[in-house]
Image (cartoon, coloured by chain):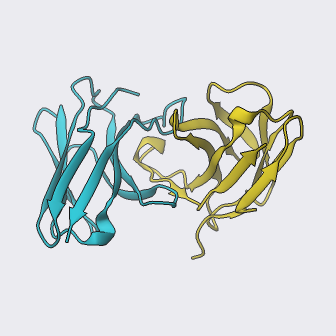
Chain colours: A cyan, B yellow
Amino acid sequence: DAKTTQPNSMESNEEEPVHLPCNHSTISGTDYIHWYRQLPSQGPEYVIHGLTSNVNNRMASLAIAEDRKSSTLILHRATLRDAAVYYCILRGFGGGADGLTFGKGTHLIIQP
Amino acid sequence: KAGVTQTPRYLIKTRGQQVTLSCSPISGHRSVSWYQQTPGQGLQFLFEYFSETQRNKGNFPGRFSGRQFSNSRSEMNVSTLELGDSALYLCASSSDGTSGRGGNEQFFGPGTRLTVL
C-alpha cells in the first residue's frame, strides 16, 4: 500500500471545526482512503473512508482532492472526546498483503 | 450487534513461557486480523485469517502463530516469550464486501495487554 504523510500533532478548541490533512501523492487509482482514530487506552476505531468523492457520516466528513493526492478529515464540531491519534491509511482493492499499515498518525489535542 | 471481544484483557508472563490470546469477531464477519502495538514500533500487522485460512502475514518471527475456527473465532499464540513481546495485542474483524477488501472497514477489539517479565 502507498504511503501517507500527516502532521505529528494538531491543536484545536472545543466546539470548533478541525481539519486534519493527509498527503498521499503516490496513491493508485484503486486505493481507498481510510481514517481511523485511537482514543487513549482503546483499540483503533474506524472513522470514515472514501475512494473519489467526498463522504459524510455521523462522525466526520472526508474531503478528497480532485487529483486524490491529498485528503482532509473534517470534524465539524470538536469535543473533548475527539482527542485521539488519527491515522490516514491507504488500502488497495485487494486489501494489501500487510493488513492496515498504520503510520504515526496525528495526535489531536482539544482545548476546553 | 456485539463488538469484537478479546480475552484476557491483561496478562503477565515470564520469559520463555508461551501465551494464547483469543478473539471473537463481530457476528457474520469472517476475516480476523491481529496487530501488535508497542510504543516504539506503533501498530504492526501480524496476520489475517479468513475462513480458517491464513490469508496474509506480516513480518514477525515464527514464534507468532494463529488459527481460526469454523465459527470465525481466532486465537494467536506466542511461544518462547521475550521481553520485547510486551505489547498491546489487537484483534480486528471485517466482512468481505462487494467493494473489495480495500473498501471494508475493520472493527477493533479493546486489546490484550501482555507484559513479559
The C terminus of chain A sits in image quarter:
bottom left
Give the residue at the far front of this rendering.
B117
Q: Residue at x 26, y 66 (%)?
A: A57
Give the answer, above or below, for where A5 lies relative to B37.
Answer: above
Give the answer, above or below, for where A4 lies relative to A40.
Answer: above
Q: Foreground residue, B72 or B15?
A: B15
Q: Position of residue B40 (x, y in %)?
A: 52, 34
Q: Position of residue B99 (x, y in %)?
A: 41, 48
Q: Is residue A53 visible?
A: no
| Numbered-mark total | 0
Q: Residue at x 24, y 30 (%)?
A: A24
Q: Position of residue A40 (x, y in %)?
A: 45, 60
Q: Foreground residue, B25 or A28?
A: B25
Q: Is residue A48 left or right of residue B55?
A: left
Q: Residue at x 61, y 51 (%)?
A: B90
Q: Foreground residue, B5 or A63?
A: B5
The N terminus of chain A sits in image quarter:
top left
Q: Position of residue A22 (x, y in %)?
A: 22, 39
